[in-house]
Image (tube, grey):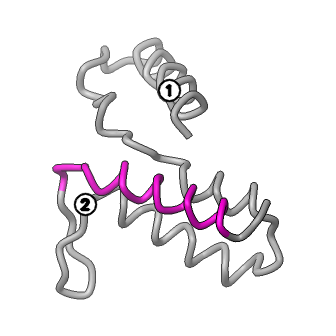
Amino acid sequence: MTQNKFELAAELIDAANNEDANIETSDGKPWPKELLYSDRMTDMQQRYAPDADDAMKLALRAQHIQRWKYPRDEYPMDRKGYHLWRTNLYTFHADTG
């Protein structure tokens, strides 16, 4: 993957996660929750697998892309509901990422 394509893909992932209305604070700064998660995953990848290929880097960055669109509390709070939620999430993430 060329650097320009990689950078564009990373920017698109970040733009999608920047839409998250759920805010968390890190180092005194407010962050959209899934953008913060993506940033943290990227930081961990750079620490533990600095030679990872671009596909792996993007997969990590997009792991929770727009996760707020499938809130856990909209599914039954039992094992079956959890598995349905996870199935819907991984399908959505695969299609979106």
Q: Quick check: is 45 in the magenta stretch?
A: no
- Check disc 1 and give the amino acid type: Phe
| Residue in the foreground of this view, choosing between 7 and 48 | 7
- Provide residue 11's location: percent of width, then percent of height: 47, 62
- Check disc 2 and give the amino acid type: Pro
Residue 21 left/right relative to 44: left
- Provide residue 17's location: percent of width, then percent of height: 36, 52
Residue 34 left/right relative to 58: left
Task: Tell me the SS state at disc 1.
Answer: helix
Q: Which mark is residue 52?
A: none
Residue in the picture at 68% in, 63% down = 57
Residue in the picture at 59% in, 67% down = 7
Q: Quadrant of residue 3?
A: bottom right
Tell me where the magenta segment starts and ends, as one range: 4-22
Q: Quick check: is 12 in the magenta stretch?
A: yes
Residue under label 1, please give it.
Answer: 92
| Label 1 environment density (alpha carbons within 10 Å; few <14, some 14–19, many ≥20) | some
Seen in the picture, residue 65 relative to 56 is either above or below; the reply is above
